Image (cartoon, coloured by chain):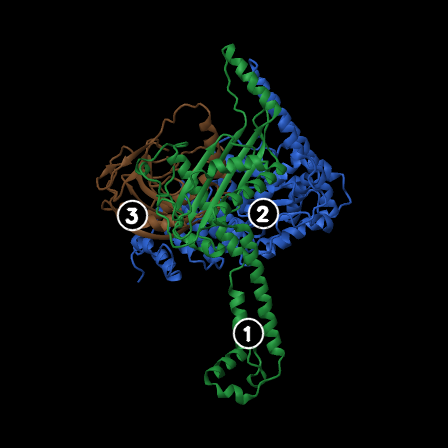
C-alpha cells in the first residue's frame, strides 16, 4: 500500500483496549483497575508524544465522539430557540409573503405543518427547516454503533492475522503467504469523517504480572526438572498489538505484534519503552521529502 | 449494517456505567479489578443488538424489582433485558443486572419474576461475587501447589467441590433473602419454590423426550451455581410457610399483559433449539388460560419440526384448530400444507400452500413454495 | 470479548513450548474441479482458496479466503440420516438436531436454522430469501440468512445452497461479517455455488 503524499497525516486513536492484572499462583488472572487505568493513561500519553514528535495530528476517538455529541445537542437547542423566537415574533404583512411567489407555498406548507391558519402564522419555514436538519443529524448512539461495528470487525481481522499470518492458531494460509493484505473495507471513511483524521490506530495490550505466589511456583517447577518431573510454569504474560488503518480504504497499512514484556506499562518510562518497541518500524510520515517512498507492508 | 428487526423501536436511554451513584463503591484492589471488568462488559452492552430496549417492558421489569426492594435500593440496579433463550438472570457487583428472555418466557406470573429478581439482588447486596472470587483465588492457589504433589489431582477435585459448597451457601442465603423481598413487596412467598419446582419439571420433560437422565440434580452448565435440587425446593417451601400472614399477590394478569407483545418471539426462539420436551412443557403452561390461535399454531410448528411418527397428523390438527380459533397468520396454511405433504395426504392441487401464498404474496420463501406446489391459480 | 480471549490464549500458548498443530491449510487452486470432503461432490472455484485439513465432521470441509473469522465456506457432502450438521459438542445439554432423509427442501432450511441457533446459542438469527435452485440437475434450495453471536459485536450474513440426493444432504454455506466482507465476496461465492456437482 503506497501512501498518499498530498495530505497531511492525522491519526485517530481508537479507545485503547488495555487490561493489566496479576497472575495468581493458581493461574487465575486477577484484574487490577488501578494498574489498568494507569497503563491506559501512560500508553496514550506515550503514543501522543511519539506521534506529535513526528508532526502527526493526533485525536482520540472518544474525545471526538463526546465533542460531536455536544455540538449536536448545542445545535439542536439553538435551532429550537430560533424557531420559538420566530414564532413569537410579530406577524408579517400578508403582502410581503404574497410578493415572493415561491415562498408562499412554503409558508402555506409550514403553516399546515404547524396546524395554524396561514394568515396569522409568521414565516418560520427557514427556522423549521433548520430544526428538521438539526433533528435529523445522527446522534451519539449512531456514532457509538459505528465505532462499535468497526471495533468488532477490526478484532475479527486481527484474529485472522494472528491465526493465519503469524500462524499462531490454525496455521498459515497458502494464498496469503506473499503479501500482507488485510482490510476493514472502505466504510471506514465514515470513521474518517467522524474523527477528521485519515488514519485510525487500534491498540491492544494485555499484561498479567506474576504475583509472589506465581514466582514461587516458577522456582518449584524448575526444581522439579532435577528430579525428572518437569512442569514449566509461565511467569507473567505480556501481549500487545497495534494496527494502523488507512481510513479512505480501510486497509491495514501497518501491523505489529509484541510478545513478552518490553517495559512496565503502568509507569511512564515503561510505557514509553513499550510504545517505542511496538511502534518501531511504523512507516515514516508519508508526506516527508526525506522519507523513502516505502511500501507500507507489515513486517 | 445492523440489519436486525429489533424488538423495540423506543430506545430507552441507558445510563453510562458510572452515572448511577451506588452507595457501595469498590474498596480493595480485588474488588476494584472486578468492577473494572464488569464495567467493561456493560460498556459493550450499550451497543449490543441483544439488548431489548422496549421501554414498556423495561419499565415493567424495573417496577417489579422496585416494588419488592424499595424505590431507594432499586435505583442501584441497571437492568438489561437480553434476547437470550435460556433460563438466567444475574447481577454484577457494579449494579448491572441482566434478565434473559428465556427467563421471562418461563415465569408464570409477576411474583415468580420477583422471586428471581430478588434472589439476584440479594447476591448483589451481599457482594457474593466478590466473596466467591476471593474464595476461588485462595483455593486455586492451593490447587496449583497441590499439582506438584503426587496424587494431587484427587486433592484438586476436593477443592473444586468445596468451591461449589461455598457458592451453595451463598445460594441459600440469597434464597432466604428473596423470600423476605417477596413478603415486603406483597407477593406470594410461595412463588419462589414454584420457580424451581417447575424448572425441575421442565428438565424432566426435556430428558424424557431425549431418552436421557434428567439434568435437574446436575452441577454444571448454566445452572452450575443454581442447581434446582429437591432440597432447595423444600427449603424455599419451608421459608415461605414462615409467613402465613403474607399477602398472596401473584400478578398473573399483569404479567401476561406485559409479556403479550413478546411471548411469540420468545417462544419461537425456544422452539428452534431442538428441545421438544421443554418447549411442549412451556407451551402447555402458556395455554393454561386456554389455547389461542397463536398457541395452537406454535404447537403445530413444534410437532411438524419434530417430525416423528404421528407428528404430521397431530400438527395438521393443531393448524386446523388454529384456523377454527380465528387464526389468520399466513404461516398457519404454510405449516398445514407442509404437514399434509409429509403425511402423504395432500391434495394434488396443494390448496393450503396456495392459500399461504395468497395471504402472504411477498413471502420470503415464495419461490420455494411455488416449486413445491405450483403457481397459485 | 469472546474472540479477544481466544486470540490472547493463542498468543500466550504460542509463547510456551507446545506440540505443533496437527491441522493446517492447503491451497485450492482456481479453475479446476476439486472433490470436497473426500466425497463425490466437486466444485470449481473461480479464485484460489485455502482448505483446512481438519474436518469438523466426517463429511465436511472448511475453506477460507482471509481467515475463518472473515469468510468461511462450509461444505457438507452426503450427510446421512441421523447425523448432525456440525459437531455435536454439547450433546448432553444442547444436542443438535439430526438430519432425516424425509426432509423436504423447506425442512432443510429449518434444519440449518435450528442447528445454527443451537450451536451458537443465539436468538438473533433470521432466514431471509428462500428460492428454488438446481444442484447437478437435482432440485435444490438456495437461501440467505443473517445472525449475530452474543459477546461478539459483529453481525454476519450468509448464503447457502442445499439438496437431498439419495437420502443424503449436500450443503454449501458461506458466512462473513456483514460489514464489507459479505458484499465483497458474495458474487464469487454465488458463482462457486453454481459449479457444485454431485
Q: Residue furthest right?
A: B245
Residue at the disc numbered 2: B104
CA–CA distance in space, label 1 to label 3:
50 Å
User: Do pointers 2 and 1 mark residues of a single chain?
Assistant: no
Name the tint of chain C in the rendering. Answer: brown
According to the picture, the residue beneath numbered tag 3 turns out to be C188
Q: Left or right? Give the position of A63 relative to C81.
A: right
- Indicate the position of residue B200 as horizontal and vertical percent values: 58, 36
Instruction: Kindly indicate whether the residue at mark 1 contacts the one at mark 2 (C-beta within 8 angstroms).
Output: no
Residue carrying label 1: A127
Chain letter, disc 3 residue: C
Q: Quadrant of the C terminus of chain A?
A: top left
Say which chain is blue: B
Q: Is residue B13 above or below residue B132?
A: below
**Horizontal and vertical percent for residue B229?**
62, 32
Give B181 or A44, whichever is nearer the viewer: A44
Please state if C196 lies on the left or on the right of A83 as rendered.
Answer: left
Q: Disc 1 sits on a residue from what chain?
A: A
Same-subunit check for callouts 1 and 3 = no
Q: In the image, which lettered chain appears green?
A: A
User: Could one spot residue B209 in this view of the protein?
Assistant: no
Please, is residue A88 above or below residue B96 in the view? below
Looking at this rendering, what residue extends furthest in the front direction?
A: A290
Side (left or right) of C180 relative to B138: left
Q: Are marks 3 and 2 in contact (CB under 8 Å)?
A: no
Amino acid at each position: 500500500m503506497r501512501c498518499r503524499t498530498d495530505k497531511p497525516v492525522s491519526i485517530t486513536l481508537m479507545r485503547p483496549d488495555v487490561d493489566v492484572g496479576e497472575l495468581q499462583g493458581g493461574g487465575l488472572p486477577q484484574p487490577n483497575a488501578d494498574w489498568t487505568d494507569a497503563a491506559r493513561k501512560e500508553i496514550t500519553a506515550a503514543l501522543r508524544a511519539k506521534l506529535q514528535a513526528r508532526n502527526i495530528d493526533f485525536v482520540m476517538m472518544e474525545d471526538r465522539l463526546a465533542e460531536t455529541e455536544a455540538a449536536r445537542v448545542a445545535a439542536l437547542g439553538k435551532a429550537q430557540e430560533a424557531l420559538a423566537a420566530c414564532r413569537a415574533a410579530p406577524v408579517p404583512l400578508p403582502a410581503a409573503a404574497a410578493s415572493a411567489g415561491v415562498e408562499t407555498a412554503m409558508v402555506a406548507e409550514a403553516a399546515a405543518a404547524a396546524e395554524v391558519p396561514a394568515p396569522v402564522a409568521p414565516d418560520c419555514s427557514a427556522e423549521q427547516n433548520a430544526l428538521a436538519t438539526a433533528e435529523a443529524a445522527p446522534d451519539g448512539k449512531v456514532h457509538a454503533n459505528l465505532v462499535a461495528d468497526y471495533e468488532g470487525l477490526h478484532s475479527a481481522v486481527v484474529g485472522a492475522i494472528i491465526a493465519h499470518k503469524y500462524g499462531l492458531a490454525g496455521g498459515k494460509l497458502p494464498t496469503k503467504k506473499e503479501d500482507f493484505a488485510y482490510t476493514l473495507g472502505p466504510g471506514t471513511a465514515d470513521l474518517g469523517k467522524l474523527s477528521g483524521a485519515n488514519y485510525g490506530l487500534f491498540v491492544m495490550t494485555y499484561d498479567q504480572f506474576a504475583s509472589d505466589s506465581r514466582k514461587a511456583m516458577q522456582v518449584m517447577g524448575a526444581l522439579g526438572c532435577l528430579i525428572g518431573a518437569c512442569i514449566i510454569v509461565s511467569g507473567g504474560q505480556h501481549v500487545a498489538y497495534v494496527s494502523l488503518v488507512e481510513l479512505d480504504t480501510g486497509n491495514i497499512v501497518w501491523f505489529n505484534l509484541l510478545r513478552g514484556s518490553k517495559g512496565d506499562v503502568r509507569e511512564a518510562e515503561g510505557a514509553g519503552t513499550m510504545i517505542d518497541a511496538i511502534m518501531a518500524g511504523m512507516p515514516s510520515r508519508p508526506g516527508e521529502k526525506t522519507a523513502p517512498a516505502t511500501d507500507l507492508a507489515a513486517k | 449494517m445492523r440489519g436486525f428487526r429489533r424488538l423495540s423501536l423506543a430506545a430507552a436511554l441507558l445510563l453510562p456505567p458510572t452515572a448511577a451513584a451506588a452507595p457501595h463503591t469498590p474498596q480493595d484492589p480485588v474488588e476494584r479489578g472486578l468492577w473494572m471488568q464488569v464495567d467493561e462488559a456493560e460498556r459493550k452492552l450499550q451497543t449490543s443488538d441483544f439488548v431489548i430496549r422496549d421501554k414498556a417492558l423495561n419499565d415493567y421489569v424495573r417496577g417489579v424489582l422496585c416494588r419488592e426492594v424499595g424505590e431507594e435500593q432499586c435505583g442501584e440496579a441497571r437492568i438489561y433485558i437480553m434476547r437470550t433463550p435460556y433460563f438466567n438472570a444475574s447481577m454484577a457487583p457494579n449494579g448491572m443486572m441482566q434478565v434473559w428472555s428465556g427467563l421471562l418466557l418461563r415465569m408464570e406470573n409477576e411474583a415468580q419474576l420477583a422471586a428471581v429478581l430478588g434472589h439476584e439482588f440479594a447476591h448483589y447486596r451481599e457482594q457474593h461475587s466478590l466473596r466467591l472470587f476471593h474464595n476461588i483465588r485462595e483455593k486455586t492457589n492451593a490447587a496449583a501447589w497441590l499439582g506438584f504433589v503426587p496424587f494431587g489431582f484427587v486433592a484438586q477435585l476436593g477443592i473444586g467441590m468445596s468451591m461449589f459448597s461455598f457458592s451453595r451457601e451463598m445460594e441459600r442465603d440469597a434464597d432466604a433473602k428473596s423470600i423476605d423481598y417477596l413478603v415486603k413487596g406483597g407477593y406470594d412467598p410461595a412463588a419462589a419454590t414454584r420457580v424451581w419446582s417447575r424448572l425441575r419439571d421442565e428438565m424432566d420433560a426435556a430428558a424424557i423426550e431425549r431418552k436421557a437422565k434428567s439434568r435437574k440434580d446436575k452441577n454444571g452448565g448454566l445452572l452450575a451455581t443454581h442447581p434446582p435440587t429437591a432440597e432447595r425446593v423444600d427449603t424455599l417451601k419451608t421459608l415461605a410457610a414462615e409467613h402465613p400472614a403474607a399477602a398472596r399477590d401473584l400478578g398473573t394478569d399483569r404479567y401476561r399483559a406485559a409479556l403479550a407483545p413478546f411471548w411469540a418471539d420468545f417462544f419461537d426462539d425456544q422452539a428452534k433449539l431442538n428441545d421438544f420436551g421443554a418447549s411442549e412443557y412451556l407451551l402447555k403452561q402458556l395455554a393454561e388460560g386456554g389455547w389461542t390461535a397463536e398457541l395452537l399454531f406454535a404447537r403445530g410448528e413444534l410437532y411438524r419440526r419434530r417430525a416423528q411418527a404421528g407428528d404430521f397428523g397431530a400438527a395438521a390438527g393443531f393448524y386446523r384448530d388454529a384456523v377454527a380459533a380465528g387464526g389468520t397468520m399466513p404461516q398457519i396454511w404454510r405449516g398445514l400444507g407442509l404437514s399434509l405433504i409429509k403425511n402423504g395426504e395432500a391434495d394434488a392441487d396443494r390448496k393450503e400452500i396456495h392459500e399461504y401464498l395468497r395471504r402472504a404474496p411477498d413471502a420470503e420463501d415464495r419461490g420455494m413454495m411455488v416449486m413445491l406446489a405450483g403457481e397459485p391459480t | 470479548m469472546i474472540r479477544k480471549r481466544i486470540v490472547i490464549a493463542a498468543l500466550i500458548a504460542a509463547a510456551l513450548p507446545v506440540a505443533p498443530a496437527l491441522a493446517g491449510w492447503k491451497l485450492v487452486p482456481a479453475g479446476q474441479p476439486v472433490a470436497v470432503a473426500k466425497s463425490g461432490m466437486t466444485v470449481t472455484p473461480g479464485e484460489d482458496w485455502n482448505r483446512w485439513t481438519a474436518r469438523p465432521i466426517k463429511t465436511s470441509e472448511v475453506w477460507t479466503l482471509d481467515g475463518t473469522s472473515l469468510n468461511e465456506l462450509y461444505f457438507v457432502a452426503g450427510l446421512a440420516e441421523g447425523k448432525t450438521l456440525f459437531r455435536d459438542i454439547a450433546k448432553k445439554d444442547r444436542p443438535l438436531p439430526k438430519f432425516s432423509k424425509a426432509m423436504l427442501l423447506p425442512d432443510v432450511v429449518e434444519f440449518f436454522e435450528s442447528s445454527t441457533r443451537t450451536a451458537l446459542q443465539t436468538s438473533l438469527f433470521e432466514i431471509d430469501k428462500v428460492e428454488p435452485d438446481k444442484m447437478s440437475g437435482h432440485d435444490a434450495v438456495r437461501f440467505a440468512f443473517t445472525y449475530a453471536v452474543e459477546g461478539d459485536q459483529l453481525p454476519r450474513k450468509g448464503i447457502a445452497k442445499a439438496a437431498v440426493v439419495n437420502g443424503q444432504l449436500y450443503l454449501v454455506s458461506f458466512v462473513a461479517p456483514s460489514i464489507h466482507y459479505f458484499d465483497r465476496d458474495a458474487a464469487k461465492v454465488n458463482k462457486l455455488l453454481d459449479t457444485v456437482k454431485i
